[in-house]
Image (tube, helix red, strand yellow):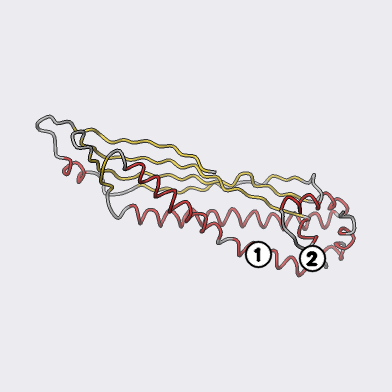
Amino acid sequence: MRSYAIAVALALLSGASGAAPLEVLCNSLPPAAEVRVLFAPSAAQLDDSKSARDLRLAADEEGAAFRHLGVTRATLQRELDIRLEGYTDERTGRACAWPKVQLHLSVSPLLVELARELEGSPCLRAHVFNHEMQHVAIYNAGAQRAAAQLEREMRAELNQHQLDGDSSTLMRDLREQLAQRWLPRLDDLVAEGNREHDALDAAEERQAFSVCNGVLPQILKTIR
């Protein structure tokens, strides 16, 4: 999900005599873009009302039955604030500006679902819950790393040169750059955490039938 807040603060230059040339004013601007990518970790909500079959159908994927005793669902939310600060010449429409970008990230909803069949074994329920909470930790840590890396990359790129061009297109061009380059880059960085999720699930598969005195086969018999 993406939302935008946009502001343009371009001071107008009139044609009055004595006004400083646009080039002079552009050179007087502090030579730096402002980029902040902020992530707010989320606490997980718990839902244990669904059956293992319901969890499998909602996931729309096949796999061993015990894989659907617990599921963690996460949706990355993005709130983007874009601003331009600089000058524009009202006679020519030419403008110069540095971008000011803030991207606020959060994971919502962050939902842990436990199959209601786990009620038959408090031990296994606690084990599955702890496993899903490790997924929650991976989601939050991965998003935090992605935010820090994206901020570094965006700051390096946007600080290379001052924006210069038609005042009517500077904001549009900046928005397109963010939408077409940087938000997809964010998705790639967040996806790097998938390896950790896969490794966690692989380790769980190796021990699933031995935890809690091997109660898992009995629980699986109750799944319809």
Mark 1 residue type: Asp
Question: For the residue carrying disc 1, how many other residues have a C-alpha within 10 Å: few (<14), some (14-19), or many (20+)?
Answer: few
Q: Residue at x 26, y 41 (%)?
A: 166
Q: Which residue is mark 1?
A: 198
Q: Reading the chain from its start, which is encountered first: label 1 or label 2?
A: 1
Q: Which residue is mark 2?
A: 208
**Left or right: 206 in relation to 38:** right
Q: Residue at x 20, y 46 (%)?
A: 27
Quadrant in which the N terminus appears: top right
Look at the numbered disc 2 and give the secondary structure of its residue.
loop
Q: Residue at x 68, y 47 (%)?
A: 111
Of residue 104 and residue 64, the one placed in the foreground of this image is 64
Task: Kindly report the distance in space between the C-alpha atoms of the residues bearing marks 1 and 2.
Answer: 15 Å
Farthest-out residue, left: 17
> In terms of image quadrants, where is residue 157?
bottom left
Of residue 144 and residue 79, the one placed in the foreground of this image is 79
